Image (cartoon, rainbow, N blue to C red):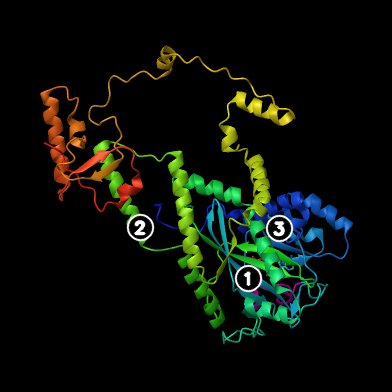
């Protein structure tokens, strides 16, 4: 992919968008941070956790499980049971069934919340202010022998409930309190009218969403950087995720599922109202515009000329890379604050410290799982690593005494690398990194490219060959008018500011 191109998925997002991986990743952090991850219902992945599941079942009473195929959607293949024998030991996710969901009009519902991720290193996460509430089509009653198979009671999927003849479609988007699909705004207003602290509830939901994304940040970061090692903008991928969230009667919320391809179908005017705004705001926020493409090709053209004339395959230094990363971050922050639309930024520099602990834990777990050592550790020599380990084990750290070498001109000269005798003749050794536009007269004392090119020529044959080469270059550049003088230590950014790169070799 070219750097101006964008793709609407992140490599590695399967780690939360597949039910089994979501369970595996969240369970790992739940073991470490117990209460902080209470928003995820007790979940087992068959066959790995079958033993744990049996143990849990033998110790508890009056519980039901909802069994889901590990990679399916729209309520397909889901059933509720309390018997372990009903559960297929292969490729299923088993979750404790929430027996006391919050009900509106006696109906069970779940919330579809849209979350946009625009960067993974560091994370950039936004939540869309509106969303959908999907309702079951038959009044809720606790699971029992005769209603266990009635999906119109227990499942809230639109794909399931639209098949019920009782299903009411919302025709008027201004009346978002009618039918079996309503808006998130309506649900929040309803809860507020019931005296519930909606602001706190929304904060808690946002917190859980961030934690869920934090648990796969190391995977996203690793996959992104291995696919695009030269991208410093952290902006080539974006993804709209659909979080399915259910509330219980005590107003605890639970994340049931994360969809990486939430439906953008607009079967009703309410769908249209919400989803078209979501798509427009997303495209605005991720800066999907043509100007990035123009800029990219302009830069490539300049680099191409530089390669042609100097033979330089330009690579940024570490400092330049950091600078470029910082610059693009500042630019994006500014853009995003102006084009938020219906989005709200929920993971930013200010609150990131709070979540760093989860990212670090996830990183450590992932490194243990994959056997990948952190880059900084991998580069340490054995000696340094031993020293680091011994420092970590002892409370008093004794630093090794380093003797200063004797400073004598002879030692100094010996420590320098030997001078290269056969320097490249075709291209000057000095790296001319920048271009200055000067008037012809005043630039006499500056070495031009042609001077350097023809310097050190061994014999007349070579001189003729080189001159021909220069002439050929001249032919390929039609609009030669002015002379540019090349000078050291000026950045590529300044080079980009020039409208066009033209060059006249001196005869
Ligand atoms: P799918 O990807 O097939 O939609 P979900 O995990 O979203 O699967 O589950 C489908 C529906 O089942 C949800 O919308 C919800 O109504 C219900 N459901 C899922 N998990 C639970 C649970 N743990 N407790 C109660 N209801 C649940």
Q: Secondary structure at mark 1?
A: strand
Q: CA distance from mark 2 to mark 1?
A: 34 Å
Residue at 19% in and 25% down? 456
Residue 143 sits in quarter: bottom right
Q: From where the camera sits, is residue 7 visible?
A: no
Name the residue at the top extreme. 410
Residue on which disc 1 sits: 112
How many numbered discs, if any? Answer: 3
Pick the front one: 16 or 184: 184
Q: Which residues are magenta?
A: 149-163
The x and y percentages for residue 326 are 48, 50
Instruction: Please tell me which of labels 2 and 1 falls first in the chain.
Output: 1
The x and y percentages for residue 157 are 65, 72
Residue at 14% in and 40% down? 472
Residue on which disc 2 sits: 293
Q: Secondary structure at mark 2?
A: helix
Instruction: Please tell me which of labels 2 and 3 falls first in the chain.
Output: 3
Q: Secondary structure at mark 3?
A: strand
User: Within 8 Å of ligand 1, the CB of disc 2?
Assistant: no
Give left or right: position of 507 versus 11.
left
Instruction: Please tell me which of labels 1 and 3 falls first in the chain.
Output: 3
Pick the front one: 230 or 60: 230
Residue 215 has which mark?
none
Q: Is residue 324 magenta?
A: no
Give left or right: position of 142 versus 283.
right
- The answer to the question of whether label 1 and label 3 lie on touching residues, with beta carbons closer than 8 A, is no
Residue 394 sits in quarter: top right
Residue on which disc 3 sits: 93
Q: Nearer the viewer, mark 2 or mark 1?
A: 2
Q: How many neighbours does mark 3 have within 10 angstroms: few (below 14), some (14-19), or many (20 or more)?
A: many
Q: Nearer the viewer, mark 1 or mark 3?
A: 1
């Amino acid at each position: 992919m070219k750097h101006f191109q964008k793709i609407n998925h992140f490599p590695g997002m399967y780690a939360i968008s597949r039910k089994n991986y979501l369970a595996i990743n969240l369970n790992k952090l739940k073991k470490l941070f117990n209460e902080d991850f209470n928003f995820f219902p007790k979940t087992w992945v068959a066959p790995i956790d079958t033993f744990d599941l049996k143990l849990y079942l033998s110790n508890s009473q009056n519980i039901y499980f909802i069994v889901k195929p590990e990679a399916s959607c729209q309520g397909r293949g889901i059933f509720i049971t309390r018997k372990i024998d009903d559960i297929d030991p292969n490729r299923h996710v088993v979750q404790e069934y929430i027996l006391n969901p919050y009900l509106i009009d006696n109906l069970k519902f779940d919330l579809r919340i849209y979350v946009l991720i625009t960067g993974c290193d560091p994370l950039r996460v936004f939540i869309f202010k509106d969303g959908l509430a999907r309702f079951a089509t038959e009044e809720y009653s606790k699971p029992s022998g005769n209603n266990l198979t009635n999906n119109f009671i227990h499942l809230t999927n639109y794909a399931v409930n639209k098949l019920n003849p009782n299903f009411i479609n919302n025709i008027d988007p201004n009346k978002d309190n009618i039918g079996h699909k309503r808006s998130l705004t309506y649900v929040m207003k309803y809860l507020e009218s019931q005296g519930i602290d909606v602001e706190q509830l929304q904060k808690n939901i946002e917190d859980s969403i961030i934690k869920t994304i934090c648990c796969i940040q190391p995977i996203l970061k690793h996959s992104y950087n291995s696919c695009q090692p030269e991208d410093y903008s952290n902006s080539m991928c974006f993804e709209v995720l659909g979080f399915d969230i259910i509330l219980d009667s005590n107003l605890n919320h639970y994340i049931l599922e994360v969809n990486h391809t939430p439906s953008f179908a607009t079967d009703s005017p309410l769908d249209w109202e919400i989803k078209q705004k979501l798509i427009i705001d997303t495209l605005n926020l991720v800066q999907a515009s043509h100007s990035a493409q123009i800029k990219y090709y302009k830069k490539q053209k300049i680099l191409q000329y530089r390669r042609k004339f100097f033979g330089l395959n330009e690579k940024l230094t570490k400092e330049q890379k950091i600078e470029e990363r910082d610059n693009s971050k500042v630019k994006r922050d500014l853009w995003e604050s102006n084009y938020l639309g219906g989005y709200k930024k929920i993971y930013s520099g200010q609150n990131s410290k709070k979540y760093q602990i989860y990212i670090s834990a996830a990183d450590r777990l992932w490194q243990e799982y994959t056997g990948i050592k952190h880059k900084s550790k991998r580069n340490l020599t054995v000696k340094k690593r031993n020293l680091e380990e011994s420092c970590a084990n002892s409370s008093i750290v004794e630093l090794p005494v380093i003797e200063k070498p004797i400073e004598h001109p002879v030692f100094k000269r010996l420590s320098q690398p030997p001078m290269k005798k056969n320097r490249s003749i075709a291209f000057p050794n000095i790296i001319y990194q920048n271009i200055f536009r000067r008037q012809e007269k005043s630039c006499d004392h500056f070495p031009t490219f042609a001077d350097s090119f023809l310097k050190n020529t061994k014999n007349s044959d070579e001189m003729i060959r080189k001159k021909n080469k220069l002439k050929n270059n001249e032919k390929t550049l039609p609009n030669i008018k002015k002379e540019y003088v090349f000078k050291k230590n000026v950045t590529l950014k300044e080079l980009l500011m020039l409208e066009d790169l033209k060059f006249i070799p001196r005869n």
